[in-house]
Amino acid sequence: MSIFTQLEDLYKRKVLRQGRDRWNYQYAAGRWDNLADLNELSRFSVIVGYAQHLKPQGSILELGAGPGVLVQRFDKSKYGRYLVTDLSDVAIEAARAELADEKTFFEVADMNTYQPKEKFDVIIINEAIYYAPSVQAALDRFAPYLNEGGIFIVSINDDGGRNAKWHVEMDACSYQKIDQTTVSTNKNTFVISVLGA
Ligand SMILES: C[S@@+](CC[C@H](N)C(=O)[O-])C[C@H]1O[C@@H](n2cnc3c(N)ncnc32)[C@H](O)[C@@H]1O
């Protein structure tokens, strides 16, 4: 690596901290440890409930999964196969070391370029759709990777207006709205949508 590349790398990691570098830095610093807190449980529970009820023994792809908190909330006997993906290799490597087994897999993947090698019954985007260009673009990108009758489950934080664009886009997107649940905790409100292709 040339000195220029090293300096550029250092600048990106330490000063700009963009994209993967930024997320890696935040995960390594423990900035997202609170995802495992009790006041995050209700949104995870609603997503798990939808997936297990609508697609028992289904195959699941999760995009922007971070350190894999959601997969830990599933009853392992109730999914067929679960692929946990995220942009951050720090988050994915830590999760893989702790959670990988014969039907739970981990892959570093940028949801804006990732091309899965298989199709799934459920595709979950849990508090991560903000890193796609739009709701419609994200769902269009992954619709070809849903099995016949497959579903999307998407959680969008309702934080008093900051995410208004994403809620408007969810309402306007072309996918069939199967159901929607809003969960409120003492800290946050989340709108969880189930969509068909
Ligand atoms: C707010 S965290 C949510 C983590 C997890 N889904 C949860 O709710 O516990 C957002 C996650 O999106 C990931 N992310 C950001 N941009 C991404 C991209 N382009 N492709 C995939 N994941 C991305 C981050 O690394 C981070 O783990």
Image: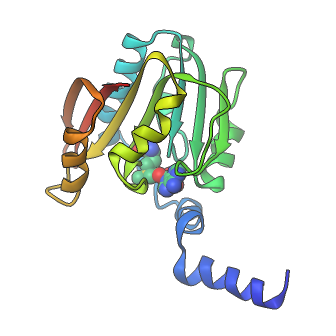
> On screen, 58 above or below 10?
above
Residue appearing at x 63%, y 35% in the figure: 116
Q: Is residue 3 left or right of residue 67?
A: right
Q: Nearer the viewer, residue 162 or 140?
A: 140
Residue appearing at x 27%, y 25% in the figure: 176
Where residue 128 appears, as percent x and y from the top left, is 41, 48
Quadrant in the picture for residue 150: top left
* Any part of residue 112 in sight: yes
Where residue 54 appears, as percent x and y from the top left, is 38, 12
Q: Nearer the viewer, residue 95 or 197?
A: 197
Structure colour scheme: rainbow
Where residue 18 appears, as percent x and y from the top left, is 53, 72
Residue ranking furthest to the right: 1
Q: Is residue 21 left or right of residue 134?
A: right
Residue appearing at x 20%, y 60% in the figure: 162
Q: Is residue 40 left or right of residue 91?
A: left
Q: Nearer the viewer, residue 124 or 115?
A: 115
* Any part of residue 33 in sight: no
> How many marks can you see?
0
